[in-house]
């Protein structure tokens, strides 16, 4: 018990790193996912091809490989660094990999939402002289977001849990790595595992409940 109390602050800091990763990646994934879905439904063939290729390649690549590429390919081989501080640099390399990965699922969820918008609305917008960007931004995407709040909530929940594999990019401050170190030093595993599992549930369950409630309140009536 004394060992658990001793390591509790480190475990708490590791968990907060996961929460911080999830918050930053969630915002950036929504932005990049929206850009990707705009490419996938664009009237320009090369944009549609580029968006589809990116989504299909990254979405079907294991997250651990994407994170490893962020650390080994982007950082070590290409020499891209975000900070001279190793922990800060590692954080943003994880953000890069997780955003690149999660945004593909955001894109596909939004594309399903775009398909629920009656095509007549887009045709009416074009008849009024609106450009593709104006039609997408003011008519199509707002309805698409409202239609897929629940699926986007599921994507965010998966992303929160995926932060536990940040070690694949060499980021050693998050909870899974701290938990392993604690196991090795104390020999205690089950109480720590249960505690972190409950901590993640305390984050993911409200996200699921909130997304479900918003989906019901903001549902588009056809």
Image: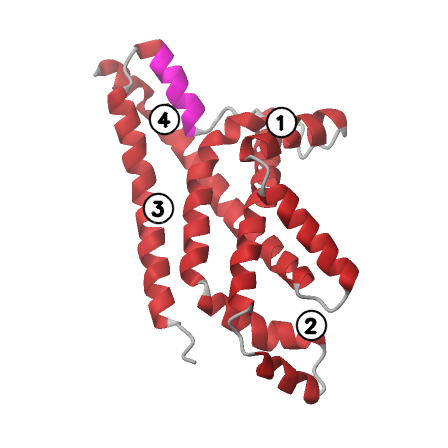
CB under 8 Å between discs 2 and 1 = no
| Helix, strand or loop at mark 2 | helix
Relative to 98, 190 lies left or right: left
Kindly identify which residue carries mark 3: 204
Q: Earlier in the sequence, mark 2 or mark 1?
A: 1
Report, in whole angstroms, how far the alpha carbon at label 2 lies from the one at label 3. 34 Å
In the image, residue 124 sits, relative to residue 60, either above or below, namely below
User: Label 4: how many residues lie within 10 Å, few (<14), some (14-19) or many (20+)?
Assistant: many
Relative to 203, 107 lies left or right: right
Report, in whole angstroms, how far the alpha carbon at label 1 lies from the one at label 3. 30 Å
Q: Which of marks 4 and 3 is nearer the N terminus?
A: 4
Q: Which of marks 1 and 3 is nearer the N terminus?
A: 1
| Helix, strand or loop at mark 3 | helix
Q: Which of 61 and 36 is in front in this view?
A: 61
Give me the disc on residue 85.
Answer: 1
Kindly identify which residue carries mark 4: 11
Point out the frontmost of discs 2 and 4.
Answer: 2
In the image, residue 202 sits, relative to residue 183, either above or below, namely below
Q: Which of marks 2 and 3 is nearer the N terminus?
A: 2
Hey, which residue is sitting farthest left in the picture? 1
Residue 111 in percent (x, y) is at 56, 62
Q: In which quarter of the image is the C terminus?
A: bottom left
* Residue occupying the point 56% across, 34% down: 62
Q: Which of marks 1 and 4 is nearer the N terminus?
A: 4
User: Label 3: how many residues lie within 10 Å, few (<14), some (14-19) or many (20+)?
Assistant: many
- Magenta range is 175-184
């Amino acid at each position: 018990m004394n060992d658990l109390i001793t390591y509790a602050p480190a475990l708490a800091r590791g968990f907060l790193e996961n929460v911080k990763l999830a918050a930053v990646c969630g915002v950036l994934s929504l932005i990049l996912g929206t850009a990707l879905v705009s490419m996938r439904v664009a009237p320009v063939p090369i944009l549609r091809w580029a968006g589809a290729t990116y989504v299909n390649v990254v979405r079907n690549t294991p997250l651990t490989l994407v994170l490893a590429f962020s650390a080994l390919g982007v950082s070590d081989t290409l020499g891209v660094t975000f900070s001279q501080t190793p922990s800060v640099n590692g954080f943003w390399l994880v953000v890069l990999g997780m955003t690149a990965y999660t945004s593909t699922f955001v894109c596909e969820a939004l594309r399903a939402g775009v398909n629920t918008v009656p095509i007549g609305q887009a045709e009416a917008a074009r008849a009024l002289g609106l450009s593709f960007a104006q039609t997408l931004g003011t008519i199509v995407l707002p309805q698409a977001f409202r239609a897929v709040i629940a699926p986007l909530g599921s994507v965010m929940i998966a992303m929160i849990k995926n932060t536990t594999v940040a070690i694949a990019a060499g980021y050693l401050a998050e909870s899974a790595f701290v938990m392993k170190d604690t196991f090795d030093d104390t020999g205690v595993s089950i109480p720590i595992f249960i505690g972190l599992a409950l901590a993640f549930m305390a984050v993911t369950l409200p996200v699921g409940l909130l997304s479900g409630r918003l989906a019901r309140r903001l549902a588009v009536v056809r």
